[in-house]
């Protein structure tokens, strides 16, 4: 991170830092590193965007995220959840995310650096609802797990400032169907 930011400073290159909605969760090393990157970015007059659970086609068999995991499981007839699914998330389809970044770069000089650019669909969805959408598409059983406190019940609210420039287009159900069809 130090080397990257030093190069950006040296060459005075416009840039966007990819942060996370978890950047204020100091109990997480991931959150702390994102917060540090945000400080560096602001000191260099870059733009910070905070991603909220971006999903799309994942082809890495060793590591995937909840939507891909559930789709893979559904093909075996059941979704075995790690939690009870009561935790809520905001999801964003990868194509919408890509479009938002293009728009941010096109408006780079107009964007207020003091505003938070939260890249999300602005809709809270319980993980159990994600499982139900996938079960509806592929007619499979859902087996909930135990409750968890992974994010310690911390639920940030996104800033809607980005909506001055961009709006997400893909519903969660349509995005999941898109991924499901690509994984056939």
Image (cartoon, grey):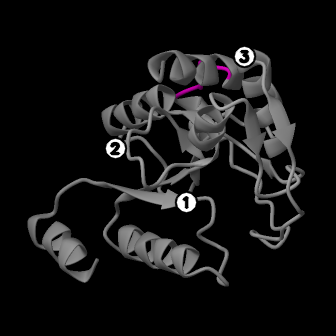
Residue 88: tell me if it is visible: yes
Q: Which of marks 1 and 3 is in front?
A: 3
Residue 132 in the image: state x and y as whole percent. 83, 29
- Look at the image and give the residue range highlighted in magenta: 166-171
Q: Which of marks 1 and 2 is in front?
A: 1
* Kind of element beneath mark 2: loop
Residue 78 in the image: state x and y as whole percent. 75, 35
Q: Residue at x 54, y 38 (%)?
A: 55
Residue 126: tell me if it is visible: no
Q: Which residue is drawn at 40% across and 32% down?
A: 98
115 on left or right of 98:
right
Lower position in the chain sequence, tag 1 or tag 3: 1
Residue that label 3 marks: 137
* Kind of element beneath mark 3: helix
| Mark 3 vs 2: CB contact within 8 A | no
Marks 3 and 2, how far apart at CA: 43 Å
**Which mark identifies residue 54?**
none
**Which mark identifies residue 20?**
1
132 on left or right of 16:
right
């Amino acid at each position: 991170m130090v080397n990257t930011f030093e190069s950006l400073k040296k060459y005075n290159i416009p840039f966007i830092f990819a942060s996370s909605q978890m950047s204020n969760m100091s109990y997480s090393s991931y959150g702390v590193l994102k917060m540090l990157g945000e400080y560096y970015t602001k000191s260099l007059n870059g733009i910070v965007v905070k991603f909220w659970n971006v999903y799309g086609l994942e082809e890495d068999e060793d590591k995937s995220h909840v939507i891909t995991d559930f789709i893979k499981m559904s093909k075996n007839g059941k979704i075995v959840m790690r939690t009870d699914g009561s935790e809520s998330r905001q999801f964003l389809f990868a194509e919408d995310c890509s479009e938002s970044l293009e728009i941010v770069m096109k408006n780079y000089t107009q964007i207020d650096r003091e505003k938070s650019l939260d890249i999300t669909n602005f809709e809270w969805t319980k993980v159990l609802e994600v499982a139900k959408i996938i079960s509806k598409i592929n007619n499979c059983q859902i087996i909930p797990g135990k409750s968890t406190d992974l994010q310690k019940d911390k639920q940030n609210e996104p800033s809607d400032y980005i909506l001055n420039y961009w709006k997400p287009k893909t519903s969660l159900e349509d995005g999941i169907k898109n991924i499901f069809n690509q994984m056939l």
